[in-house]
């Protein structure tokens, strides 16, 4: 039977992926408590719907950082997409554009920025890790800007990597023929081959800058004309500091439960972040979103949009570009249905009044 929801795609992807690739995509840190809680927290929120409202003409359109999108759902940055499908990030970029939304491209892409932008049919943001080699980092920013990316998303919660025990057991490595393509010009595209556990963790230890601090947010904002968003914010004080240091937006994110286990679920952290920024910058959220009702709940708490990562990978593994397009369309249709059943004809009508 054809998949009818995101969970069906997850099951299909499990059948198609190698166990190492599946575990890399699916795993969380340590006991995976935060990984599970990211979605479980949505299940505990109740929707208090309204009735006798004209919902005959509904729209899921939303505006995110100036982009007019077909839905308040964007594609989160995920690494090494050619583990899922030979077309990798290029297929995802085409699918996101065809679905009327935007993609965030990972620094740790198995396709170069330039090749992804050549394939893209819609807007693309570039997710940035800061390397010890600041010239290599600066070159990434310049390439993203020159290629036509419309924003930078600085990941701020991964100066070191959380311990993902599935990757340690599998001794995760990229298979022959795959590498961190964006770092090839700097000669930093390969994992250490002598890693005793996860090759990804060894790569991060050897390459990422652990001195990253708020002064570097100011440095990055001064380096580019593109708006800069910070991804990995769960504390309201950090949200206020993001505003003070020139960020255009924040992602409430715990890295998909892959960094600090027992960190709060992102939907639980979201209300305080929204209150802290007080409308001065945009707020997005990722982590655990699997249903249209999850999207509506996040918007009701004040997010401009949500980002989905793993479901996109499941669609890519199951059906390439078309699989990603179908995943996004299934989610958009669920958002439309949830809005209508809540008595909301547009994204702008969703507010905290519908939450119980």
Image (tube, helix red, strand yellow):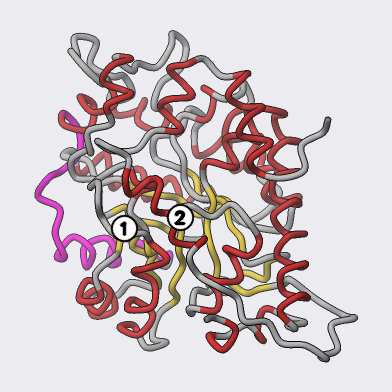
Query: In the drawing, does residue 229 fall left or right of residue 236?
Result: right
Residue shown at the point (45%, 32%) measured from the top left: 25
Q: Position of residue 213 (x, y in %)?
A: 14, 59
Please state the extent of the stretch shown in magenta in the rendering: 206-226
Residue shown at the point (18%, 40%) measured from the top left: 160
> Height in image: 71 above or below 188?
below
* Mark 1, residue position: 232
| Residue 145 seen by the camera | no
Return the residue found at the far right: 56
Please tell me which residue lies in front, 3 or 212: 3
Q: Position of residue 94 (x, y in %)?
A: 69, 42
Please tell me which residue lies in front, 165 or 184: 165
Tell me the tag on residue 40: 2
Query: In the drawing, does residue 343 fall left or right of residue 294?
Result: right
Please tell me whether residue 217 belongs to the stretch shown in magenta.
Answer: yes
Please tell me which residue lies in front, 53 or 163: 53
């Amino acid at each position: 039977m054809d998949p009818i929801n995101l969970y069906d795609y997850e099951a299909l992807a499990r059948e198609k992926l190698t166990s190492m690739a599946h575990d890399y995509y699916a795993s969380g840190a340590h006991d995976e408590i935060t990984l599970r809680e990211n979605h479980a927290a949505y299940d505990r929120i109740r929707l208090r719907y309204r009735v006798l409202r004209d919902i005959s003409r509904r729209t899921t359109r939303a505006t995110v950082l100036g982009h007019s999108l077909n839905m308040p759902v964007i594609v989160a940055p995920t690494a090494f997409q050619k583990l899922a499908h030979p077309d990798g990030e290029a297929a995802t970029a085409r699918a996101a554009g065809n679905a009327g939304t935007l993609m965030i491209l990972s620094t740790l892409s198995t396709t170069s920025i330039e090749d992804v932008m050549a394939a893209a049919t819609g807007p693309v943001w570039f997710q940035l890790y800061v390397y010890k080699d600041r010239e290599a980092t600066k070159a990434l920013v310049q390439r993203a800007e020159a290629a036509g990316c419309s924003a930078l998303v600085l990941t701020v919660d991964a100066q070191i990597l959380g311990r993902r025990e599935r990757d340690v057991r599998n001794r995760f490595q990229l298979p022959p023929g795959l590498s961190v393509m964006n770092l090839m010009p700097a000669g930093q595209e390969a994992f250490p081959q002598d890693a005793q556990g996860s090759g990804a963790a060894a790569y991060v230890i050897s390459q990422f800058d652990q001195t990253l601090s708020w002064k570097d947010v100011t440095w990055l904002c001064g380096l580019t004309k593109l708006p800069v968003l910070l991804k990995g914010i769960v504390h309201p004080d950090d949200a206020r500091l993001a505003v003070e240091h020139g960020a255009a937006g924040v992602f409430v994110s715990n890295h998909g439960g892959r960094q600090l286990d027992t960190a709060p679920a992102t939907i639980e952290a979201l209300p305080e972040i929204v209150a802290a920024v007080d409308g001065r910058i945009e707020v997005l959220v990722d982590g655990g979103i699997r249903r249209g009702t999850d999207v509506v709940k996040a918007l009701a708490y004040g997010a401009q949009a949500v980002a989905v990562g793993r479901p996109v990978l499941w669609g890519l593994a199951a059906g390439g570009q078309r699989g990603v397009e179908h995943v996004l369309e299934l989610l958009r249709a669920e958002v439309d249905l949830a809005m209508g059943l809540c008595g909301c004809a547009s994204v702008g009508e969703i507010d905290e009044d519908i939450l119980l």
